[in-house]
Image (cartoon, grey):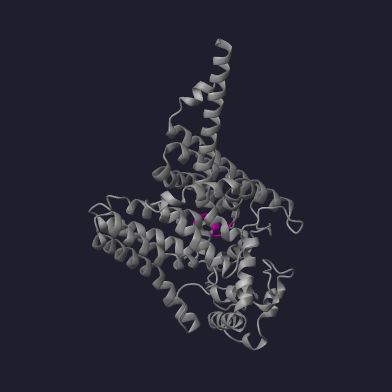
Amino acid sequence: MLDNLRSWTPRRWLAVIILVAVVLRVAAALYMGDTITDLPGIQDQVSYDTLSLRVLDGYGFSFGELWWPATFPDEPTAHWSFLYTLYLSAVYAVVGHHPLVARLIQAVLAGILMPWLTYRLAHRPFGQTVALAAAGLSGVYIYFVYYAAALMTETFYIIAILWTLDISMRLARKGGPPGRWTGWGLQLGLALAVTVLLRQVFLLFIPVLFAWLLWRSYAFQNRAVGRMLAVELVAGVVLVASILPWTVRNYLVFGTFVLLNTNAGYAFFWGNHPIHGYNFIAILPDSGMYMELIPRHLWGLNEAVLDRALLERGIGFVQADPLRYVVLSLSRALDYFEFWPSSQSSLLSNISRVFSFGVLLPFMAYGVWANLRRSLKNELFLLYLFALVYTTVHLLTWALIRYRLPVDAVLVIFAGWALVRLASAASRRNLFSRRQVAQSQSS
């Protein structure tokens, strides 16, 4: 049996990993069922489900009652991902209001694409064995399984990030992009567009990504900066073209400029409000407290203007007490990197946390540390850049465990490397011990 497994090709192993990943995610989808319930960590699916039905009923992007974060009944909203809302609306338009169908589609796509993209990202710098280990970890990672069935942006967003990183790492190869720079630009632009339309926070990473690609092209690709600039120009045009319709829509309904979504101001305001003191509270004990924190005289503003007003007040909190902001941002690390069980969490949340991030964290840390120096000379450094920038953005604004999941999707690659490295060392040690025993017996 063992010899038979050893004879398997990498393609067969990857197929098995993908099959297991799909089965686990489909099981999670069946567990959540054909209704929308308020399960731990996935409350936003209630909003996406409600909003998608409103779109189908012809009311546009709006809610029929006062809704999070502070959207009045029948007033336009841009707080939620337009792309994901349209995905749900499209599914419901075909099969009726059956959340289970949307869950199953998402689960199958996630089970296939996440391990496959993880394999691709890991194979380039680390080789086949590590790539299979990383894909396996991605396939069974409990958080990924759980969120694959949740009707929220998380799963598609992580897949889009991995897709973007995969294209970027191929662009950064020593030989540089092939002559079809237009095709590369279209690929990168489409990946960026999908990622940003799912969650606009990724916009903050794009300048870093473009700068790194230019640096790579200058330093390691015979100074092919012009070709890389052309790729980025095409990608930028595609990205702008994908955002522009929503910018126009927002101006028409709000009467003011909103690039894409209205959530940055709310997040920065609540995340840095004096109610936290010097210790960030990830989730306030009563969800109604968030609305109560909004000054009464601002309630007459529409969602977009209110978002901008709250951002200004949030910046005011920082300017009034910079030291508190620094300490508060540092305290967010405890919520962002939490891996231990908590009495405030449900049993399901504790199991997911401990047996996913908690178990793999030492291997992630070891892999990141051990490969830091070598990453400076190859495309692996892009993974470090993404993890660092993305983590910093959330530590400076608002930190939740689910906001860390895109970073987890990158860190499982380093965990896979560490596990393979440790397994190889243990195998060599075992072989050495056997040789010693054999020599002692022969003598």
Residue at the front extreme, as displayed: 443
Q: On the image, which quarter does residue 333 sit in?
A: bottom right
Residue ID at (57%, 61%): 403
Residue ID at (41%, 70%): 243
Using the image as rendered, state which of residue 210 and residue 197 is in the foreground: 210
On the image, the x and y values in percent for residue 156 come to 50, 56
Magenta segment range? 151-156
- Whether residue 256 is in magenta: the answer is no
Using the image as rendered, state which of residue 186 and residue 165 is in the foreground: 165
Residue at the top extreme, as displayed: 442
Using the image as rendered, state which of residue 160 and residue 118 is in the foreground: 118
On the image, the x and y values in percent for residue 75 come to 57, 79
Residue at the left extreme, as displayed: 179
Residue ID at (24%, 58%): 224
- Whether residue 152 is in magenta: the answer is yes
Question: In this rendering, does residue 264 appear at all?
Answer: yes
On the image, the x and y values in percent for residue 283 come to 69, 66
Compared across the picture, whether 240 is left or right of 88 comes to left
